[in-house]
Amino acid sequence: MKKRTQNDAPIYEALEEFRRMRIVPFDVPGHKRGRGNPELARLLGERCVSIDVNSMKPLDNLCHPVSVIREAEELAAEAFGAAHAFLVVGGTTSAVQSMALACCKKGDKIIMPRNVHRSIINALVLCGARPVYVNPDVDQNLGISLGMKVEQVEQAIRDNPDAVAVFVNNPTYYGICSDLATIVEAAHSRGMKVLVDEAHGTHFYFGEDFPVSAMAAGADMASVSMHKSGGSLTQSSLLLVGEGMHPGYVRQIINLTQTTSASYLLLASLDISRRNLALRGREAFARVADLAGYAREEINRIGGYYAFGEELVNRDSIFAFDPTKLSVHTLEIGLAGIEVYDILRDEYDIQIEFGDLGNMLAYLSIGDRKQEVERLVSALADIKRRYQKDKTGMLSQEYIPPRVVMTPQESFYAPKEQLPIREAKGRICSEFVMCYPPGIPILAPGEEITDEIIEYILYAKEKGCSMTGPEDEKIENLNVVTEGKEE
């Protein structure tokens, strides 16, 4: 194999060569370069469906890469400062689960904040590990959970010296970062691995003015959503690992759950996006940070809204702030974030990332331009003028500390029954309940259902939050562990 540089995109180049060869397909996929599904070809375009192909020798195989996919992974590792990198086509959910499964087995303890994406708790359902939660501080004004305090992590490590790993959510959806380097040092001093959900931190690897990246901080593994701020196709991600992990074993873990029929559209998008970031990422993300700063200033000039930023940093529970995040507190104008989210979409044709009970997030990245930001600012000013009301009686809290009674695996697989939500008070939940996005569980399997949680769920439904997780799609009932079965 020739020596590759960041100017190369091995998978993309191999696909282009394959397309020029005009090979007759007697393999899958069955649409046969779009001929068998003309509507699909019209939707996606002939060029796209012509490279929606199966693994073959010239194109390598994601489960056991030896040529172009391996080269693409080596270039990704180099670009992100990792010892090894793995292309992932099951989303960052798959990457997060692979991190947990690579380090934890049944009965192992893993230290983690509770305000995590459901993907890591799903992994605990699969492997049977026991979570040791570090409950985050909460900003009472904004109603959002913050980062992990070093002192809380160190206390959890002292109290649980047999824990095998520390899991860090960095940055949070709102842009809040923990003191990752110090947490890594504390965990490593006790022989624990550090796993980082870096879904929203792709750009940390491409700029001097961003919070420290997981690999630079010495973490053992990090999951990176290239499709979020990195520009690749939805569902494509990277799993980065440091020197302390055995890459062959990590590959085996990934192959336990990842498809054996990887999409070359996703793989090529990862390859091309890595090249784009390696060559132009620093300049591009500097523009994104400037654009977000401009947006915060303009939104705060409106009054009522609060687009928060680096002024929150306290070098503890908010060790750093992601300057590209455009998070806006909306309660002072008497509207929940989800209400502003709905109004923007329904009346102004503006789709933002998510809204919760007190905040909204407009996700800025390399494809945004100043004119779109100005349109958002104008819409927010108009919404305030038309819809502002008294905020009395509105809830704001985004995080409710849970009472954990059973492990996620024990409760998920335990005998269960379904109860109306108001009758479930005091029982042990055996399923998830969350607003999505952001996908942080309000309830997770193994946690006690309290009055506060019930009222939060009902209020979030009333305000229009997109609720997911329970077996009951209307979320009028919850599955609970049958009495007498909890530990």
Image (tube, rainbow, N blue to C red):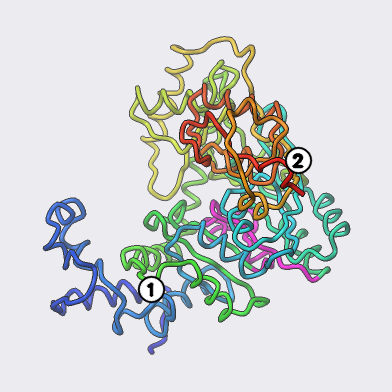
Q: Earlier in the sequence, mark 1 or mark 2?
A: 1
Q: Mark 1–mark 2 contact, CB under 8 Å?
A: no
Kind of residue at disc 2? Arg
Circle 1 — which element?
Answer: loop
Kind of residue at disc 1? Asn
Q: Nearer the viewer, residue 307 or 195?
A: 195
State left or right for residue 61 relative to residue 142: left
Q: Residue at x 61, y 44 (%)?
A: 416
The residue at which mark 2 appears reads as 403
Q: Is residue 25 above or below residue 95?
A: below
State left or right for residue 262 relative to residue 37: right
Q: Say the numbered circle drawn on residue 7.
A: 1
Q: In x, y percent, where is residue 324?
A: 53, 45
Evaluate whether residue 342 shows in this view: yes
Q: In x, y percent, where is residue 344?
A: 40, 26
Q: In x, y percent, where is residue 250?
A: 57, 75
Q: Residue at x 61, y 33 (%)?
A: 308
